[in-house]
């Protein structure tokens, strides 16, 4: 392949550049061009150098960024895809462990998998790249429009709810009509993943709260109103929740102090999904009382990372459903369109950002 413009970093140290790259050892039977690429907390963490688990592909002193994308097929030698098809490429590529071999590299058991734009494999923020058809998921719903770029972040949420469902089976968790109505879910953070968690939580029937330690912008308040989500500003309500306990806690902040504060407000048989990653978050102290609290209430703390092909497919179905239900309001989750070459976007979060995307 010839030279193309790309966003690159040097993992795990950080930095970001928009420059020409030539990646001529790439294999694949489909050539893709991104239509949109999304930027998320992982990209910003990499640029800041706070994600020590990231690394460059073998033989390269840089890594092309980008793992959230909606692409168009521009050439295909695959019977499954034709020119013009819209697809989402998978992030994780299997290693050789038993989980990877059964199509669940999201549960890789020896760390030998790779992740496009994150760990040892070039990502999607470049004008053109090749991939194999088995790494692509087709976007069939034409009405999804730009929202299809959210398939990747949504697939993480679909998997995390699957983890929740498996763990919740150990006790009577749902109410007497087998729903989660009356149960409380608290999501720490108000970024794109937090909002997608909140949409799903509302769908499951939870009384759903999202929280930050500062006020949020009007567009986010509006999004909460549209979807039936309650927002908590913890600087104004430091004791929240006082009168009830949290049944399902989801963290997207990666901040240990905040996580443990709310773990101590969890209910019996509560489940906490730890999802936010921030290697540079400050230390926190926990003591024996914290441990006793968790044990005496059968609280589960579960990490959840990535997702498998099936979760991408379900993510597309959820996005179609939310788009049908909320129409234009759903489109507002994309809060900014940027041009290739914009670097500031990686270093500074635009005000009111839910999801910023680059239009290629
Ligand atoms: P993001 O938009 O940076 O979201 C993080 C959110 O946490 C922001 O709203 C932060 O607020 C908020 N936050 C940070 N510290 C605190 C605190 N102490 N108390 C309350 N809220 C706080 O990123 P994202 O939504 O794209 O992704 C969320 C996280 O999940 C990132 O760390 C990603 O690396 C991680 N992630 C994990 C997976 C996986 O495990 C997948 C995708 C993302 P502010 O910035 O407005 O102040 O598979
Ligand atoms: C991606 C996941 C990936 C994770 C690594 C996330 O932003 O969505 O697919 O496994 O980063 O922490
Ligand atoms: Zn991401």
Image (cartoon, helix red, strand yellow):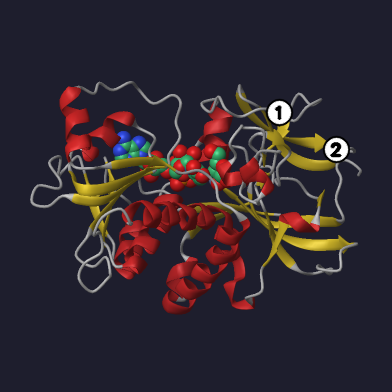
Question: Which residue matches tag 2?
Answer: 23
- Residue farthest left in this picture: 243
Position of residue 220 measured from the top left corner of the image (x, y, whole percent): 35, 57
Position of residue 238 measured from the top left corner of the image (x, y, whole percent): 15, 40
Q: In the figure, residue 94 lies in which quadrant?
A: top right
Indicate which quadrant contains ligand 2.
Answer: top right
Secondary element at image label 1: loop
Position of residue 117 measured from the top left corner of the image (x, y, whole percent): 67, 39
Which residue is depicted at the point 23% across and 23% down?
Answer: 286
- Relative height, residue 279 to residue 44 (above, below): above
Q: Using the rendered image of the protein, determine whether residue 311 is visible from the camera's viewpoint.
A: yes
Which is nearer the N-term, disc 1 or disc 2?
Answer: 2
The N terminus sits in image quarter: top right
Camera-side residue of 108 and 317? 108
Image marks 1 and 2: residues in contact by CB distance under 8 Å: no
Q: Is residue 203 left or right of residue 177?
A: right
Camera-side residue of 179 and 127? 179
Q: Is residue 184 left or right of residue 121?
A: left
- Relative height, residue 249 to residue 222 (above, below): above
Disc 2 residue: CB within 8 Å of ligand 2: no
Disc 1 residue: CB within 8 Å of ligand 2: no
Camera-side residue of 330 and 348? 330
Which residue is depicted at the point 62% across and 57% down?
Answer: 309
**Label 1 to label 2, Cα distance in Å?**
13 Å
Q: Residues within 10 Å of mark 1 (few under 14, many from 20)?
A: many
Which residue is depicted at the point 31% across and 42% down?
Answer: 300
Tag shown at residue 56: 1
Position of residue 202 measured from the top left corner of the image (x, y, whole percent): 32, 65
Secondary element at image label 2: loop
């Amino acid at each position: 392949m010839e030279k193309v413009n790309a966003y690159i970093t040097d993992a795990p140290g950080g930095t970001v550049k928009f420059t020409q790259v030539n990646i001529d050892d790439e294999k694949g039977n489909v050539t893709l061009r991104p239509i949109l690429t999304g930027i998320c907390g992982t990209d910003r963490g990499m640029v800041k150098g706070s994600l020590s688990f990231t690394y460059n592909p073998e033989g390269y002193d840089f890594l092309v960024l980008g793992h959230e994308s909606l692409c168009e097929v521009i050439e295909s030698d695959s019977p499954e895809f034709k020119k013009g098809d819209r697809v989402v490429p998978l992030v994780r590529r299997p290693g050789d462990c038993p989980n990877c071999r059964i199509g669940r590299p999201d549960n890789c058991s020896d760390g030998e998998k790779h992740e496009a734009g994150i760990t040892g494999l070039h990502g999607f923020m470049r004008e053109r790249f090749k991939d194999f058809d088995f790494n692509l998921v087709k976007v069939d719903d034409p009405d999804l429009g730009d929202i299809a770029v959210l398939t990747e972040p949504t697939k993480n949420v679909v998997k995390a709810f699957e983890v929740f469902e498996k763990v919740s089976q150990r006790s009577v968790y749902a109410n007497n009509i087998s729903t989660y109505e009356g149960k409380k879910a608290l999501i720490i953070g108000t970024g794109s993943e937090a909002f997608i968690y909140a949409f799903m939580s509302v769908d499951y029937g939870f009384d759903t709260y999202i929280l930050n330690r500062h006020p949020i912008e009007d567009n986010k308040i509006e999004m909460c109103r549209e979807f039936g989500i309650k927002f908590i500003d913890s600087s104004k309500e430091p004791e929240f929740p006082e009168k009830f306990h949290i049944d399902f806690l989801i963290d997207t902040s990666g901040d240990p102090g905040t996580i443990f504060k709310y773990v101590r407000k969890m209910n019996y048989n509560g489940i906490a999904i730890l999802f936010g990653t921030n290697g540079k978050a400050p230390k926190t102290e926990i003591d024996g009382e914290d441990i006793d609290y968790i044990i005496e209430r059968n609280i589960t703390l579960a990490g959840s990372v990535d997702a498998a092909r099936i979760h991408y497919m379900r993510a597309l179905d959820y996005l179609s459903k939310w788009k049908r239900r909320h129409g234009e309001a759903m489109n507002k989750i994309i809060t900014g369109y940027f041009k290739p070459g914009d670097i500031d976007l990686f270093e500074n979060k635009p005000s009111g950002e839910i999801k910023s995307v680059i239009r290629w």
